[in-house]
Amino acid sequence: MRVPLSWLREYVDLPSEVGGREVATRLISAGLEVELVERLGADLTGPLVVGRVLAIEELTEFKKPIRYCQVDVGQANGTGQPQNIICGATNFAVGDKVVVVLPGAVLPGGFKISARKTYGHTSEGMICSARELGVGEDHDGIMVLPPEHEVGTDAITLLELLDEVLDIAVTTDRGYCLSMRGVARETATAFGLPLRDPALLDVPAAGGPGHPVRIEDEAACDRFVARVVTGVRPDARSPIWMRRRLQKSGMRPVSLAVDITNYVMLELGQPLHAYDAARLNGTIVVRRAAAGERLTTLDGVERKLHPEDLVIADDRGPVGLAGVMGGANTEIADVPQEPRSPLAPEVGTTAVVIEAAHFDAVTVARASRRHRLSSEASRRFERGVDPAAAGAAAQRAVDLLVLLAGGTAGEGVTDVGTPAPPATVEMRADHPDRVAGVTYGREVVVRRLQEVGCAVDGSDILDVTAPSWRPDLTEPNDLAEEVLRLEGYASLPSTLPRPPAGRGLTEGQRLRRRVGRALAGAGYVETLNYPFVGEKALDALGLPADDPRRRAVRLANPLSEEEPWLRTTLLPGLLETARRNHGRGSGDLALFESGLVFRPTGLEPAATRPPVTRRPTDEEAAALRAAVPPQPRHVAVVLSGAREAAGWWGGERPAGWADAVEAARVVAREARVELIVERDQHEPWHPGRCAALRVRLDGERRLVGHAGELHPRVVKALGLPERSCAMELDLDVLAEAAGGPVAGPDISTFPVATQDVALVVDNAVPAAEVEGALRAGAGELLESVRLFDVFTGEQLGAGRKSLAYALRFRAPDRTLTAEEATAAREAAVATAVSRTGATLRGA
C-alpha cells in the first residue's frame, strides 16, 4: 500500500514539522512494515508554471516534426512576454494549457533547463511530458491541462509534485491498512491525535426504486449495495488532484467513473465496481457459475468459469467475477481524458450503477488463484473488507460522480443481505499483563482496545466487541497483541526463559551428537540434503521392483515433479552431493549425513482431516498418529578417492569397502554396541564386496544396515569415481540395542595377559563367526578379541585362509597366571574348532 503523506494529512492533523520518516518510525513501532519512504520531487526546482499556447509554427525542413511555439506564461518569466519554445510533440493545439519549465529550473533526474539555440531558433524553456515531470511513463506527447487553470499558476503545487510516499507491506491480518482510512487510524493512534474518519457520511436508508439485486449464495456474499447515477457527462475528466493521488498510490488513471471507484477503494478500503447501466439487462444476481459458462473479463481474456466461482450476473449471464474483476460486456466506455472538440459527437456512458458488496474472503481467494487473476479488489477481499463500509463507499462514489461528472443520484438505494455481527470476545482484564510480563492495568487495556475501535464492557472480565473492519480479532491473545503493539514492543523487558530442572538431552539426542562428533573426528564432512527423491534416483541405485525402499510417501504438493516422494534411504541425496563435488574438482571425498527416512508399511490407515474450529479429540489425534508412516533415523557415509593422502611416508591409500565397514564400527562404538559383520548381497552394493551389519537385540541378531563398495553399474549411472563406497545404518535400532544410558567401564588395576592364535578355515567361513566362537569358548576372563592378520597361500591349500587373532585376558581381582591364560586360550580354540571346522595353524 502506497500512502501519500499529503493525502494522509487530510484525516490526521500531523504537525507541519513531522515528515514521512517520523511517520514511518511510529507506524513500524505499532507493528506495520514500512519498507520505503519515497521523496517525490526531491531534486525538482522551479520555475514550473501553467502556460497557454498562443501560436505554433511548423518547421518542415527537418526529418521529424518540429514546432516553434509561442507560449504565454503570465508574469512567471518576469516580463509578461511570451516564451519561444521548440517542441517535438504534436498532441496539442493553439489555446491549449500546458506545463512549461523555464530556464533556471531543474527537472527530476538532475536535468537542468536553460535557453539554448536548436533547430535554427532559440528555445526559452521546455513544454513538459508526464515522464519528464516524474508523474507517469507517458512520453509520446506533452501533458495537456484542463482549460480552467490560470496562466502562470505554479505547476509544482498544482500537480502536487513535492510529496512523500510511504510504501507499506500489509500483512494478511491487517487488510484494513490497504486503505487510507486504515493507515490514518494507525497514524492517529501512534501520534495520539484525533481521526477524521472518511467513512462517516450521511448514507440514505435502503428503499425506493433502486436497481434490483438478488443474492442466491448468502454464505459467499452477505451484503450488496447498488446505487444509480444518471446524467453523467461522458466527457467529464478526472481532476488533477484525483489523478495525482491515484498515480502516487501506484494506480493508472483511466476514466472518471473508473478513477472514482479506484479512489474510493484506496480511501475507504471497499472495492467498488461501476457498470454501464445501459448494458445491464434485468436484475443483478449474485450466484455460483453454471457449468459451461464463460466470461470475458476487463483484461480482454475469455475465461471458462468453474462451478465454485462466484459471479455477478444479469438476465443474459455473468457480467463479473465477484471480488476479482468485472466483465467486458458491461464496461463503462473509455472516453479519452484529453480535451475534445465541442463539435465532436457525445460518446460514452451516461448512466452508471455502482456496486459495493462484501464477499467471502476464501471464495475470492480461490477464484483469483484458479484463474491466475490478481487484482487490487481481490487483494483486499482476501484479507478481509469492512462489511459496514459498503454503504458509505457507495455514497462517496455517488457524491463524486455528482460533483465531478454533473450526474444525478438516483432516489432508490438497494441494500440487500445481512452481514454477520462483529465477534465478542471474553477476556480477563489482566490477560495482556500476563502475556507481556508487564503490568498495564485495566485502564490502559481498555483505552488501547477502544483506540483500535473495540467496544469494551465489564470490570475484571471484559466483553470486547471487535470493530467490523477487524475480522482477525477473535481470541484473547489477538486483543492482547493489540495492547502490546500500541504500548510499544520496545517497552517489554528482556527476560530469559527458565527451563524446568531435570530436563536435558534424551539418550537418542546424545547418541546423534556423539555419532556426529565421532565421524567428523574420523575425517568425514557432514552434509544436509533435501529429503525428496524420485523414481529416477531409485532406478540409478538398481533397486528391484519389490524392494521396500521403493514404497514411498508421495507429497501432495512437491517442489519438483521429478522428486515427488519422501526419501526411504539417505543414499540418493548423499551420492548426488558426492557427484556434484567430484564434478567440481573434489576427488577425495568422505561425506556423512544423519536424518530421518520415511518407510511406509502400506498398512497405515488413511488420515482424517479434523475440523479447525476446535482441538482434536484424543481419538482423532491417535488416528492421525496411526496414519503417519514409520520415520527411523539413519546415518550414512560415502567415500571416494584417497582415504589417506600421499606424502613422504609413502603413497596414497584409496578408500575401500573396509573403510565403509570401519565407519559403521565407529558409529556402533558410540552406541556401545558390538557390530556383527557378515557377507551379503544387497543393492546398491557390489555383490562380492557388501557386508550386512547386525546387532544382538532381544536374543536375536537384528539387521541394522549395510556397508561396502558400490556396484559398478551404480557408480557409472551416478557419475561417481570408480570403486566409491557407502554405508548406511539405522540409528534407532542401534539406540535400542544400547539398552539405555551408557555405564562407565570398570578399569582393572591388574595386568593383561595376551595370547595370539592363528586358525585355518575355509574361505566361506566368515571371520565374525570364528570370532564369535572364540568369545564363547574363552569364558569370562576374555577382555577383547582383535583380528590382526588374514593370510592365504599355497601352503594352506586351495580355498583356505588363515585368521590370526589377539586374545586379551584379565581378571578383575587378581593377576592371571600363565596356566590360566593358556587354559582360556585352549578353550577358545576348541570351541572355534568344533563350531567352524578350524584347525590350529602350525599344529
Image (cartoon, rainbow, N blue to C red):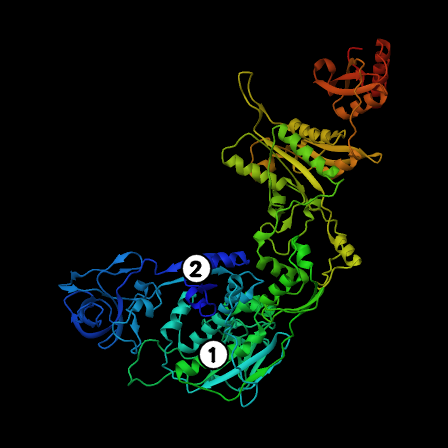
**Front-most of residues 350 and 281:** 350
Tag nearer the camera, 1 or 2: 2
- Is residue 836 at least partly visible in the picture? no
**Number of numbered discs present?**
2
Going 57% across and 52% down the picture, which residue do you hit?
490
Name the kind of residue labelled 1 in the image: Ala
Between the residue at mark 1 and the residue at mark 2, the CA separation in whole angstroms equals: 29 Å
The percent coordinates of residue 597 (x first, y second) are 68, 44
Residue corresponding to mark 2:
20
Counting from the top left corner in percent of width and height, residue 573 is at 60, 41
Sequence-wise, the earlier of marks 1 and 2 is 2
Q: Which amino acid does label 2 sit on?
A: Gly
As rendered, which of 401 and 374 lies closer to the eye? 401
Per the image, the residue denoted by label 1 is: 397
Q: In which quarter of the image is residue 483?
A: bottom right
x, y percentage for residue 709?
64, 31
From what the image shows, is residue 429 above or below residue 358? above
| Front residue of 246 and 751 | 246
The answer to whether residue 334 is above or below residue 123 is below
Q: Residue at x 58, y 70 (%)?
A: 469
Q: Is residue 282 left or right of residue 816?
A: left
Confirm whether residue 817 shows in the render: yes
Q: Position of residue 714 (x, y in %)?
A: 60, 38
